[in-house]
Amino acid sequence: MLKNRGIAFKLIILITLSSSLIFLLIFTYNYYASRRMIEKNVEENAKNLALSTVNRIEIVLRSVQELTENIACFLENSTYNKKELLQFHQITVANNPEIYGSAIAFEPYSFDKNSPAFAPYFYKENGKIGLKYLQDVLKYNYFVSDWYQIPKELNRPIWSEPYFDEGAGNIMMATYSVPFHKNVKGNRQFMGIVTADVSLEWLRDMLLSIKILKTGYAFLISKNGTIISHYNKELIMNETIFSVAENRGDALLREIGRKMLKGESGFVPFRSIVRGRPCWMYYAPIPSSRWSIAVIFPKDELTEDVVHLSRTVIFLGITGILLLSTAVVLNTRSITKQLRELSEAAERIGTGNLDIELPPVRSGDEVGKLTAAFHYMKTSLKEYIAKLTETTAAKERIESELKIASEIQMGILPKKFPPFPDRTEFDIFATIKPAKEVGGDFYDFFFIDQEHLCFIIADVSGKGIPAAIFMAVTRTLIKAIATPGMTSGEILTKVNEELCIGNDSNMFVTVFCGILNTKTGEVIYTNAGHNPPLIIHKGKEVTWLEGERNIMAGAMEQFVYKTEKFILQDGDKVFMYTDGVTEAMNEREELFTDDRLEKEIITIQEKPVREIVAGIMEKVVSFAHGAPQSDDITMMVVKFNGGEKGF
Amino acid sequence: MLEIDKRYLRSLYKEIIIRILLLIFIFLFSQQEIRAEQPLKKASFTPHWVPQAQFAGYYVAYEKGIYKKYGIDLTILKGGPDSSSVEFLEKGKADFAIMWLSTAIQKRSQGLKLVNIGQIIQRSALMLVAKKANGIHKPQDINGKKVGLWGAEFQIQPKAFFKKYNLEVKVIPQSFSVNLFLRDGVDVASAMWYNEYHIIINSGLNPEELTTFFFYDHGLNFPEDGIYTLEKNFTENPSLSCAFVKASIEGWQYAFAHPDEAIDIVLKYISLANLPANRVQQKWMLGRMKDIISPQDYKTRIGMLNRSDFLRVAKEMRENDFIKSIPDFDSFYRNCFTYAEK
């Protein structure tokens, strides 16, 4: 399809086609216009030629007519004896070079009452005048000859059909016959016919001298359509225009022939008689004999010059179009070459190779501008990528450092469970599932003295390195501050004091700190802004630890944290967690919620600590259903097994 | 000596070669000689008009060696207005002649002992032609008009026709050209279907502009061209006469089967006679000859003369005083087909 071809191809096709079309239109118009012009000229020319020939023939025929009519006039208006008649007749023939011979043919017994026929005929022979009596030659039966009978029956002068006269050396002749009469008792009585024979050899010469273009010619047909003169001798007297038409099944030619015989004139297309070439023909009548002349010239000769010129024009046109195409090819090639280079370069840039050589900017045109833009784009991309690489490297370094920090941080949390295998008064299990980023959750537990287990779960505000550092600081502080005899409130008050010192970044941490008396099951605790834990009473209900929620540690100096307490019975458990559990989000941005947590705890409340943590973790994960974890998820369960048992 | 010897040898070789060639020639020719069996008999023949396709069968038979095949060494004489075929036959200038049936009947009844040995044309081609423009559409329209008629036998049918339709016409003698008709010197002209009618067409008149009266269509079918010889010729050598008839018929059959070749032959004779030669005209003529020599609706064998045709012609002739008595059919017509069978 054209759509997918190159610009060069499209341009060549478009330009070549449109210029060819324009050329063709101009050429065609030019060809037909000049042809029309020439045709018009030639038609005029042919018409003039035909008419002038008609006039020349007319002059000869009319002089013969006049002469014959004069003889008839003489015969009608004079009295003569045989001798006088023959003398007059002979002189007339001798003195008129245009006629070959002449007859005066009388009706039976009208010249001489004793003679059934009398028809003297004077003719020229070798420069002398000869005399024949037609009644002898034609056996007293010249009365049925055309030259006699037709004018007699029609009672008017008439030209005969041309004929070959054997006596005169087989030359073509035509005879003009005039009837003459005599007044007998007031009646015009038909006496006979006067004739004059005229050789038509000059006609042939005259018509042969007519030359139109190269092979144009003229021909003459008689009243019967017989071909009297034609350059092809074989046609003469042998063919009529109608036999030619019949021979080639040309109804149109027959129609033309009929029009010619009717004395019409016209300019018509015609196929030449001998070779059937397409021709133009002008025909016109010769009025006196009612013959018709036709002037013919081949169409191809008529248009020969035009055809010749047209050939040159076509040659020039094609050459021009070829040159134009070549120019277009070269020009578009240089353009598309650059474009191709650019597209190749763009492809390679796409694969990430920015070091390739771009084509140089060669011009200020659109392609040049495009190339310049490519150069700029390449440079910019290169710079950008360099910067990006640098930044990414830095970021990666920080990230890897962070990761290490996070790992270290996680590493410091106790991970060995059970942590105190020799202490059976309680079970403890905790887990932390860090979010992608370094977070600030942590848990911890340790013995302050032999009977008191301190357990902490905390969540530092914010994320990242500062949170991690803050968390580490907080944890270290708690561990350092917690000494035997201290309540959880005292510990946190002190921790708070320490945290507030130099806490310019206003970071804080929520902490739930509990101290379990492993003998009694009494737990003192302080909640510094942390989510309230759940107390799972063995075989009974699950309750929220609705104690005082103090302010978060590190938020306010001089704050004194209150200590509260509750008792764990045998088998009771404390479930602690960070907001990473209740605020876990699924893809619909719904939260896990406290209620859901409570419900899920209830279903598994009788399970061992490890399974409770694992169960809730599973629920949270399945709730999130693949949604990214945005916060650390930390859980810790402490179960009291009864003080006495351990000892 | 050596020179002479060489020459002698050379001439000897030549002679040997020539003799061998001669032997071959003789052998080849003897094949044909044997077929011909007997030497060719000389005979002469005249058509009753100038060479044209009307006589194509005879010229073709001659040119194709059919006469020779039948053992005849034929000479075809030039016919035409100046040479009457009857006269040629009568004076012994021709052994065989073409004549119209009517002419022959007339001559026979006048005492010339000629016999018909083959009736070639079965259907009359003689007709009258008129221009519709002159108001002639049916026979009655001819009444009072000028009618061009040829002489003698050409007048029998027209006169019977005028009588049949009770027409009074002004008869104008008609020459061999149709110009008088074309120039309106006569209103009605005589014409042969195969000749003048087509000349008129090829002088620019269209068939639809003409009214034609075929005598054939008006119960006046006069079979025309037949082959005649003198009774004594026939009696002396009937096999020659019948060989001529059969060869001629074969010539016609060949001409109808090969019209282009036949026309070429006819045109050759026309141009030998120095006459206007027009292929289209001859083609038309040959076509019409086929129509009238072996009409499609006709059962008669080519060359046969029907008694009924003979009687029709003879009766019309007697009624119009062309003859006084009707000749005896069986002595007038010698059927070569039955003769050969005998």
Image (cartoon, coloured by chain):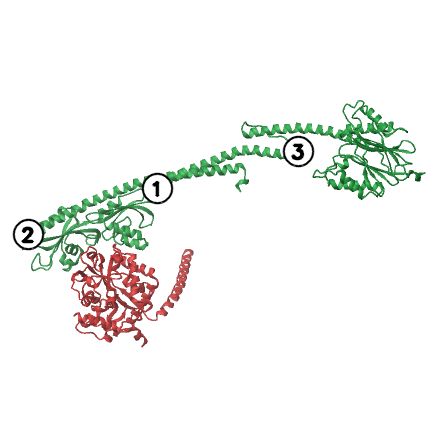
Q: What residue is pinned by disc 3?
A: A352
Kind of residue at badge 3 = Gly
Sequence-wise, the earlier of marks 2 and 1 is 2
Q: Position of residue B70 (x, y in %)?
A: 32, 69
Label 2 close to label 1 by CB (< 8 Å): no
Near mark 2 (Cα within 10 A), the count class, few <14, some 14-19 or many ≥20, is few
- At label 3, counting other C-alpha atoms closer than 10 Å, the crowd grade (few under 14, some 14-19, many 20 or more) is few
Q: Secondary structure at mark 1?
A: loop
Q: Residue at x 29, y 60 (%)?
A: B284
Q: Earlier in the sequence, mark 3 or mark 1?
A: 1
Task: Describe the element under mark 2 as helix, strand or loop.
Answer: loop
Please identify which colour was used for chain B in the image: red
Q: Amino acid at mark 1?
A: Thr
Q: Chain of mark 3?
A: A
Number of numbered discs: 3
Q: Is residue A578 left or right of residue A85?
A: right
In the rendered view of the protein, which quadrant contains the C terminus of chain A? Answer: top right
- What x and y, as percent, mark residue A213? 31, 42
The answer to which image quadrant residue A153 occupies is bottom left
Residue lying farthest to the right in this orientation: A647
Q: Which residue is tagged 2?
A: A80
Q: Amino acid at mark 2?
A: Tyr
Please state if B252 lies on the left or on the right of A425 as rendered. left
- In the image, residue A513 lies at what x, y percent? 84, 32
Image location of residue A111, percent across then percent down: 8, 56
Q: Which residue corresponds to mark 1?
A: A303
